Image (cartoon, rainbow, N blue to C red):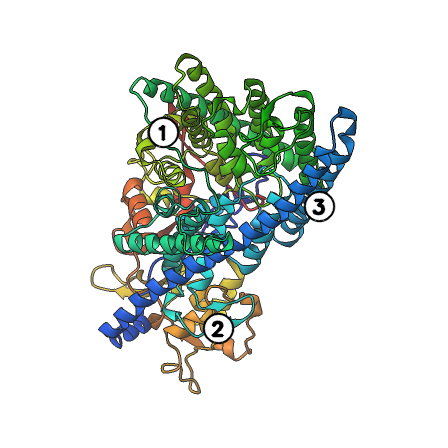
Amino acid sequence: MDFKGYDLSNESEEIVPIGSLNHLSTKYESLDYEVIENELYREEEQKKGYRYVVQKDFSRWMTFFWIGVTIAFIGIIIFISIEIGTTFKFNMIKKYFDGCTEADCMVKPYFVALLLNLIPSLVGSCLIVYVEPMAKGSGIPAVKCFLNGIKVPRLIRLKTLVVKVIGVTCVALGGMWGGKEGPMIHAGSIVAAGVSQGKSTTFNKDLGALNFFREDHEKRDFVSGGAAAGIAAAFGAPVGGLLFSLEEGASFWNQALTWRTFFGSMVSMFTLHSVLSAYHGHPGDLTYKGLLNFGKFDDLSYHILDIPVFVLMGIVGGLTGALFCHLNLKLFIFRKRYVNKDWKKVLEVLIVCATTVTISFLLILFTSDCKKLGLDPTDHPIQFGCNDGEFNAMAALWFQLLEGTVRSLFHDTPDVFNTTTVVYFCICAYFITLWTYGVHFSGGVLIPGLCTGAAWGRLVGRAVFHFFPNTNIGIYSLIGAASQLGGITRMTISLTIILVEATGSITFGLPLMICLMTAKWVGDFFSESIYDTQIELSGMPLLAWDPPPLSSNIYANNLMTHPVITFKTKETVGNIVKILKRYSHNGFPVIEYVQNYELDEGKTKCYLRGLILRSQLIVLLENKVFDGPLTNYWDSVTMETFREDYPRYSSIEDIELLQNDLKLTIDLSRFMNPSPYIVQHTMSLPRVFKLFRAMGLRHIVVVNDSNEVAGIVTRKDLARYKVIRHMGKISVTELKFSSKMD
C-alpha cells in the first residue's frame, strides 16, 4: 500500500487516540492519474487518427450531457417524493393543531408529529448504519478527497447512490436538520463516475462503450463535472456549481474541463426546471427554480455606510462558525467513545428527531406570536393559540421544510416575526444544527447553516430598521445566512455566486463577498473548516495546495521510504506472487543489474528501467502472460485487457496458478512505464511537492547520483507534513501513521 512507509511498520500499529488530528490512516490509497506510456499504449496510439480524436471529444460532451440529465432526474425524484410526503405530513399536523385552542390539547398533535417524523428517520438511519455507511452526511469531504487523488472505498458505488437518495428523502420527511443540497453533490459525483464508464460492476453489465474513459484521470474530470451539476440542480446555480468544483473540489483543472463542466451544469438545471415546471402546471415556463428557491429580492440597494455592518456580521459568522467546528469536534469524540454500537447510532438519530419535535412544540406553546393571514410565509399556516384569521408565526418557522424556513426569514416585511420569536428560534437552530451534524443520516450542513444565519441576520436587520425605517430586513437576513455558512464551511467565491444565482440578485455580489471573506479570515484564525476537520479525523492524506513553508531544507532523501521492493525486467512468476502476497505496496520500480568493469572495478549496479503497478501485475497473472515454449501472448494482450477489470481488480489471493506456472517468467519491459517521474535525492521538498501536486502523481522514484534507485516518494510521505495555523501562529508538524483508524 503506497501510504504505508517501508520503514514504518511498527509505528503504523499505534492505536490512535479518539479525535486525534495528527494521524494518517494507511488504509487509503491513491488514484493512478499518470498515463502509463508502455509499449502497448504506444502501439495503440499509433493506430489512432484524427477521427478517433474527434470521436473521443464528442463522447466527452455527450457523456457530460447525460450526466446532467441523469442528475436532474435524481433531483426531480427527490423533490417530488419530499413534496408529496411533507404535504401529507404537514396537513395531518395542521388538522390536529387547528382543532386545538388550549394548551392541554397539544398532546394529540404532538404525538402525531412525533410518529410522522420518527418513522422516516428510523428508515433513513437504518439504511446508513446497516446497509451503506458511506452514504452518511453530505459526502462533500469524501468527494473533495477523491478529487484530490485519494481512492475512497465505496464512495462512488451504485448502492451508495440508492441509499443516499432514499436517505436524504427520509431526512426531509423526518424533519431532521439536514439539507438535501450537500448530498446532491455526492449523488452527482456517483452518477458521473458511473455514466462515464459505460458499465456497471454492481450488475456485472458492460455496454462495451466509452472504454477509453476507463482511467482514473478521465474519471476524475467527470466526477468534477458531476459535483458541479449536483450543485446546479440543487440551487439552480450552474456557475456556482462550476466554481464549487474549482474552489472546494478539483485539484487538477484545465480550460476544456471548464467548458464541459459548465455545459453539464446547464443541462442539469435546464432539465430539472423543465420537468418541475410541467409538474407544477406551467409547462415551458423555465423560470421555476431548482430544488431550492429563496425567492426574489427586488429592493437590494445598499449604502456605503452598510459595509461596516456587513463586515461586523462577517466577524460574527466567523466566530460562531469557528465555535461550531470546535464544539462539533468535541461531539465527535463523545460519539466515538459512547455511541459506538450500531443500535446506539440509530437510537441517537431517533433521540435527535424526537428532541427537535419536542423543542418546536414547546416554543409554540410558550410563545405568543400571532399574525394576520396574508402575511403567512408558509403553505401550511397553523392557528394554534391565535384568533380566527390569524396564524402562529413560531409554528410557521418549524412546520415546513428548512428551505421554506430560510425563505420565510428572508421575508422583507418587518412584522412577520416578533423579535422574541426569532431569538428563540435562532438559539435552538444553532444547537440543533450542531447536534444533528455528524449523526448517521444523509444530510448536509448547507441549508441548516443558512437557516441559522438567516435568523440572527434578521435580528440585525430589525435593529437597523429601528433607526432606518426604509431598510430591507431581508438583505441582512441574507448576509447573516452567508456569514454563518461561510464561517462553518469557509466557502467564499462559490458560495457568493450560488447565493447570487439562487436569489437572482447580481447587484448584491459585493456585500456577499465582503462578509464571506471576513467570515473565512476570522474562522481560519481559530479553527479549520468543518470539512477539513472531518477529513483530518478520518486520516485521509489530503494534499494541500502549497508545500509547507520554510521546508527547503528537507530533501527527497529525507522524504523517501526505503528500502524499496523492486522487480527485474524479467521476473519469475513465483517471486511476483510472493512479493504481492507479502507486501501491500502498489508501485514497484523495475531495475536492471549492470556490471561496469571499466569504471567501477566490476561493481554491479541496479539501474532504474521503469515502474509497474500492482494492478498491472494482477492482470498479467490473471491472463497468464508468461514467457514459455507454449505461450504466445504478444497479440492477445492489449490495453483493453487492462481496462476490462477497471476499477475493481482482483486480489492476489483469488488468482489460481499451477505449480509449473510459478517457474515461468514475465517480461515486464513491455508493460511497465519506461519513463516514470524521477527526482534526484538532493531535490528539496517544495520542488517535489509541486511536481507531485501539479501532475497528480502517485509515485516518484528517487535516484542517487549514479541513477540507482534510492527510494520512493508517495502521497503519504508528503501529506505527513501538516501546516498548523492557529491564533495567528504557524507551525509544521509531522503526522504519525496508523492502520487502526476508524
Give the residue displayed 33% in from the left and 73% down from the top. 40
Q: Is 598 situated above or below 392?
A: below
How far across and how far down the image is residue 711, in percent? 36, 51
- The disc at residue 299 is 1
Residue 539 seen in render = yes
Give the residue displayed 58% in from the left and 48% down from the top. 83
- The disc at residue 206 is 2
Q: Is mark 2 on a helix, strand or loop?
A: strand
Amino acid beneath label 1: Asp
Asked if the residue at tag 2 contacts the one at tag 1, i.e. Cβ–Cβ closer than 8 Å, the answer is no
Q: Is mark 1 on a helix, strand or loop?
A: loop
Q: Which of disc 2 and disc 1 is earlier in sequence?
A: 2
Residue at image mark 3: 119
Q: What element carries label 3?
A: helix
Amino acid beneath label 2: Asp
Q: How far apart are marks 1 and 3 (CA)?
A: 43 Å
> In the depicted view, which residue is nearer to us: 490 or 725?
490
> In the depicted view, which residue is nearer to us: 272 or 544?
272
Nearer mark to the viewer, of 2 and 3:
3
How far across and how far down the image is residue 508, in percent? 33, 31
Give the residue displayed 35% in from the left and 35% down from the top. 505
The quadrant the C terminus occupies is: top right
How far across and how far down the image is residue 715, in percent? 40, 48
Mark 1: give few (<14), some (14-19) or many (20+) Cα within 10 Å: few
Q: Quadrant of residue 421?
A: top right
Q: Which residue lies furthest to the top in this view?
A: 467
